[in-house]
Image (tube, rainbow, N blue to C red):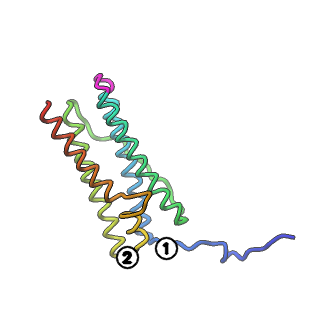
Amino acid sequence: MKLKIAQSEHKSTCRLSNEMIDKLVQQIQHELYNHNLYKTFANFFLVEGLMKLHLYYTERANEELTHHEWIVSYLNANHIEFKYPSVPEISETFDDYITPFELTLEKEIETTDLINEIVDLALKQNDWLTFNWLMKDSGAKLVAEQREEESISRTVLNIANQDD
């Protein structure tokens, strides 16, 4: 005997707006770009023989992958079907030791601005699930994480400028 399930009972309803989904997918792209950028910096410092900086940027790159996974998991938990975005080639150039730290701070500020746009959209749409996920959820604390990443980036840039 086969059990028949009505199509409407089996189908889940998406509670996220198309605009929110687009913003989150764009954030995936941004996090993956940051990952690739930081891996580029890690490679640069490895080639220069600066292993601690290579390891520092390798860890930073891994954190960006984690942020990307948080967003993917959130979309998956909400049963959102999406296409993975293409990631642009790294366009930043540098030929000194300070520029990677300056570019890192710029990227982290840009990332904070993008996450703030998602927070603003969640508030505008009364999307309390996404707002809570961004702010307090045990798995993804993107707002707090960005505060920490900007702070670390500023501190490391200050150290690099002092120890030129």
Residue indicated by mark 2: 125
Q: Is residue 90 magenta?
A: no
Give the position of the N terminus as an image quadrant. bottom right
Q: Count residues near mark 1 (Cα–Cα under 10 Å), then give few for <14, some for 14-19, many for 20+.
A: few
**Percent x, y for residue 88?**
37, 46
Q: Marks 2 and 1: in contact by CB < 8 Å?
A: no
* Image-based side of 61 in relation to 72, left or right: left
Mark 2 lies on a secondary structure that is loop
> Magenta segment range?
46-51
Give the position of the C terminus as an image quadrant. top left
Residue indicated by mark 1: 15
Residue shown at 27% from the left, 55% from the top: 147
Q: What mark, if any, has residue 42 been given in the picture?
A: none
- The image shows residue 131, relative to residue 72, as above or below, that is below
Residue shown at 34% from the left, 45% from the top: 34
Q: Nearer the viewer, residue 126 or 155?
A: 155
Mark 1 lies on a secondary structure that is loop
Q: Nearer the viewer, residue 152 or 65?
A: 152
* Image-based side of 89 in relation to 98, left or right: right
Q: Is residue 47 magenta?
A: yes
Marks 1 and 2, the one that precedes in the sequence: 1
**Disc 1 residue type?**
Arg
**Percent x, y for residue 105?**
23, 46
